Image (cartoon, rainbow, N blue to C red):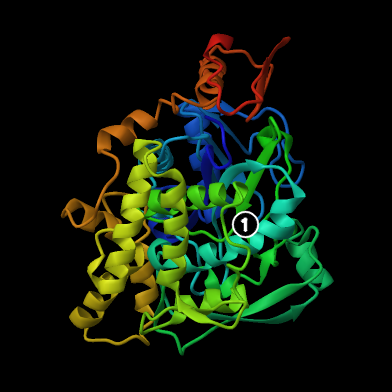
């Protein structure tokens, strides 16, 4: 059955740290993150041959030719010119388990490339969403297919904000400290000349300073969101970034691009975040959310929930009534239960776990470290404080925070917890290994991946063009407009 939010995917922007002294000692010529991510990308496409690199420019500025390409598992790996960071976009998925496995598969490819390049001593990649010291933030963006209508962005989106603002109580990844944004004015000519790509279409920027009043908060990105909805998001970050591209548009549907998200290490939190969001989008599109379910000031509520040290998580509604974030979530849960319970095993899982996590949050959130990233990270940081005999003012805590997001299972602090059986999983290691080569079997990613495999062979065709909604190889055009179809017959 086709419906809004039936197809979803996630784009993750990775952070990279380079120890140039360690690399120099190993004989490597790499000295900075830009060189490191280029080496990783080139190794995966030209040596490992996990996909077909773009021979054409997708965007003359942001994604020139050979900046990345599509993979044989249905996903896409590339370097975003803004910030020169690695980015991985999962395949189109209909099943939450496929999404999590496909996402983790991308991380394992990156880790494998680092090892095969001999860079393990000096290069580390992170699935986090904030740079504590520079003040930069980078996203883990979610995409959902929705019915393309002005009504959603003009009316229904206001009933969506309460859910997005409050879901951080179970989807937040946690962070040490906080940031304050200050007016930065327009970039000067020297700044623009030094970093021309960063300032394309930018009229105003902001400065970031540390907020020492905050020891720990739920979200890494809440301090950086300054708009509810915006089309131009560089230095203008929003909850939602409307998209109208052709490759997601089919049968009256298009892509909903959520900017306010962050990289969950915990598989359960990842799946529940996407699963609950997909159901709420359905509720909105089916007209089942009460029109008065609106926050008075969404962005203020976003930061207040993230920064509440007592976990009361109170938000003010448009009618002036103050209620708990847990209760806001329960409103959406009841609506979704009444409308969709029993339709599928996946929907039933989301509804049951949604209720379970809200019950746990209401009872004692700090007992949910096996399912919620911010709780697990807070425990790790507090254990470090105790063992080191330090306090929350210690800058070393930012490094502890960061290492929670190290994507290498042999090094990441999250993976140490997982190895000890202290996390709730939704996929197996075999699922992840399989997803490194196999795409989801129930979306167009299956058909596209077969064509990518054909192109990626050592003596494969050199005249090709690949996009989400179609592939051209020589004079053959394979049109794939419907993400629900597998297009297996095309091969």
In this rendered view, identify the residue nearer to me: 291 or 356.
291
| 386 lies left or right of 165 | left
Residue at 47% over, 47% down: 339
Mark 1, Cα crowd under 10 Å, few <14 / some 14-19 / many 20+, is some
Circle 1 sits on which residue?
Answer: 83
Looking at the image, which residue sits at the far left?
A: 420
Residue 344 coordinates in the image, percent (x, y): 38, 36
Q: Quadrant of residue 357?
A: bottom left
Residue 484 coordinates in the image, percent (x, y): 55, 27
| 117 lies left or right of 427 | right
Relative vertical location of residue 364 with respect to residue 102 in this rendering, above or below? below
Mark yes or no: residue 298 visible.
yes
| 462 lies left or right of 174 | right
Q: Quadrant of the C terminus?
A: top right
Residue at 35% over, 44% down: 348
In this rendered view, identify the residue nearer to me: 159 or 422.
159
Q: Quadrant of residue 227?
A: bottom right
Residue at 22% over, 75% down: 383
| 42 lies left or right of 227 | left
Mark yes or no: residue 142 visible.
no
In this rendered view, identify the residue nearer to me: 343 or 463.
343
In this rendered view, identify the residue nearer to me: 467 or 58.
467
Residue 26 coordinates in the image, percent (x, y): 37, 50
Residue at 74% over, 46% down: 149
């Amino acid at each position: 059955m086709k419906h809004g939010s039936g197809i979803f995917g996630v784009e993750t922007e990775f952070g990279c740290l380079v120890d140039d002294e360690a690399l120099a000692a190993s004989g490597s010529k790499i000295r900075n993150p830009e060189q490191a991510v280029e080496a990783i990308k080139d190794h995966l496409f030209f040596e490992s041959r996990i996909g077909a690199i773009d021979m054409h420019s997708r965007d003359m500025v942001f994604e020139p030719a050979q900046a990345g390409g599509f993979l044989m598992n249905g996903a896409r790996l590339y370097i975003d010119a803004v910030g020169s960071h690695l980015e991985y976009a999962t395949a189109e998925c209909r099943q939450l388990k496929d999404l999590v496995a496909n996402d983790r598969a991308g991380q394992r490819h990156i880790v494998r490339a680092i090892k095969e390049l001999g860079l393990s001593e000096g290069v580390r990649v992170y699935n986090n969403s904030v740079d504590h010291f520079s003040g930069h933030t980078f996203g883990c963006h979610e995409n959902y297919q929705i019915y393309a209508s002005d009504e959603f962005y003009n009316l229904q989106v206001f009933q969506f904000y309460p859910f997005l603002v409050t879901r951080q109580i179970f989807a937040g990844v946690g962070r040490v400290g906080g940031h304050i944004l200050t007016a930065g004015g327009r970039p000067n000519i020297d700044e623009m000349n030094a970093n021309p790509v960063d300032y394309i279409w930018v009229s105003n920027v902001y400065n970031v300073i540390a907020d020492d009043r905050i020891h720990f908060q739920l979200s890494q990105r809440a301090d950086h969101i300054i708009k509810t909805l915006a089309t131009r998001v560089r230095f203008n970050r929003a909850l939602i970034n409307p998209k109208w591209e052709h490759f997601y548009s089919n049968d009256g549907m298009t892509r909903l691009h959520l900017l306010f998200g962050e990289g969950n290490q915990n598989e359960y939190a990842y799946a529940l975040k996407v699963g609950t969001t997909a159901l709420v989008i359905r509720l909105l599109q089916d007209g089942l959310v009460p029109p008065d379910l609106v926050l008075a000031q969404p962005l203020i509520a976003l930061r207040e929930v993230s920064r509440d040290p007592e976990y009361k998580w109170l938000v003010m509604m448009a009618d002036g009534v103050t209620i708990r974030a847990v209760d806001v979530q329960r409103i959406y849960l009841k609506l979704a239960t009444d409308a969709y319970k029993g339709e599928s095993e996946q929907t039933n899982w989301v509804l049951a776990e949604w209720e379970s996590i809200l019950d746990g949050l209401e009872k004692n959130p700090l007992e949910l470290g096996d399912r919620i990233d911010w709780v697990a990270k807070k425990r790790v940081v507090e254990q470090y404080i105790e063992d080191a005999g330090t306090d929350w003012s210690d800058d070393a805590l930012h490094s502890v925070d960061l290492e929670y997001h190290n994507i290498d299972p042999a090094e990441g602090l999250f993976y140490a917890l997982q190895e000890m059986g202290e996390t709730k999983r939704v996929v197996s290691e075999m699922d992840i290994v399989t997803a490194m080569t196999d795409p989801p079997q129930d979306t167009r990613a299956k058909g596209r991946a077969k064509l990518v495999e054909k192109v990626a062979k050592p003596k494969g065709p050199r005249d090709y063009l690949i996009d989400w909604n179609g592939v051209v190889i020589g004079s053959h055009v394979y049109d794939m407009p419907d993400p629900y179809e597998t297009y297996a017959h095309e091969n």
